[in-house]
Amino acid sequence: MSAHLDRLLFAQGGMCFFCRNPLPKADASVEHLVASSNGGANADDNCVACCRALNQLLGSKSIKEKLQIVLNQRGNFKCPAHLATPPKPPAPGLADTGNSPSVSAPKPAAAKVPSATQERLELVLADLKKRGASRPRKTSTLTSTIKALIKQHRQENLSDADLNGLIGELQRQGKVTISEGKVTYKVG
């Protein structure tokens, strides 16, 4: 994979394919335009080098969903790796399904979380603390667990964008770390 990433970075002039910011190899990851889980090949014509945070955001979304995220930026693309506040994914789609490398979301100094999101976040954190050693270990399990929890306790269907926002906030607060589809916790 290292030679593949080297080729992509060279072809892209050492820049992220999406945000066009300089991209050190240590911060780079291979994004499959058509996700591997959706049948995409590991060939150069289906792969680009991009920031790890962006790879995490795009996950295994369809090419249509990925394009919608890029197009919704209306102008200069704002990569999640370079934002002080978390991006709200504009297109539907689940969080990371395990096809992207390790991601550490940026931690804003004092980001304000909307009250509905804060209530959901507190509910999720309480549930994760209660679960102890039986917390979900895969991203896909975590996403379905959160959706079911919110539906059961708040009688609402959580949109995929709100779900991604919650998981992003858990990462920003250092409560959850996602690496290659596996989840680790620091929730007490």
Image (tube, rainbow, N blue to C red):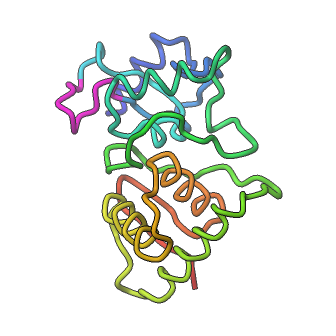
Residue sitting farthest toward the front: 155
Q: In this rendered view, identify the residue nearer to me: 122 or 80.
A: 122
Q: Taken as a whole, is the magenta stretch helix, strand or loop?
A: loop
Image coordinates of residue 82 in percent, x first then y, are 69, 35
Residue in the image at 65% along x and 62% along y? 116
Q: Quadrant of residue 93?
A: top left
- The answer to whether residue 142 is magenta is no
Image coordinates of residue 187 in percent, x first then y, are 57, 79
Residue in the image at 59% along x and 27% along y? 23
Determine whether, in the image, residue 24 is placed left or right of residue 157: right
- The answer to whether residue 33 is magenta is yes
Query: Dividing the image into 4 quarters, which one contains the N terminus?
Result: top left
Residue in the image at 64% along x and 22% along y? 22
Residue in the image at 51% along x and 18% along y? 17
Q: In this rendered view, identify the residue nearer to me: 111 or 172.
A: 111
Image coordinates of residue 62 in percent, x first then y, are 31, 30
Total marks drawn?
0
Q: Which residues are magenta?
A: 32-42
Query: Considering only vertical position in the picture, is 68 above or below 180?
Result: above
Determine whether, in the image, residue 117 is placed left or right of residue 7: right
Image coordinates of residue 97 in percent, x first then y, are 32, 50
Determine whether, in the image, residue 9 is placed left or right of residue 180: right
Q: Quadrant of residue 71?
A: top right
Query: Dividing the image into 4 quarters, which one contains the C terminus?
Result: bottom right
Residue sitting farthest toward the left: 39
Determine whether, in the image, residue 9 is placed left or right of residue 87: left
Q: Quadrant of residue 47?
A: top left
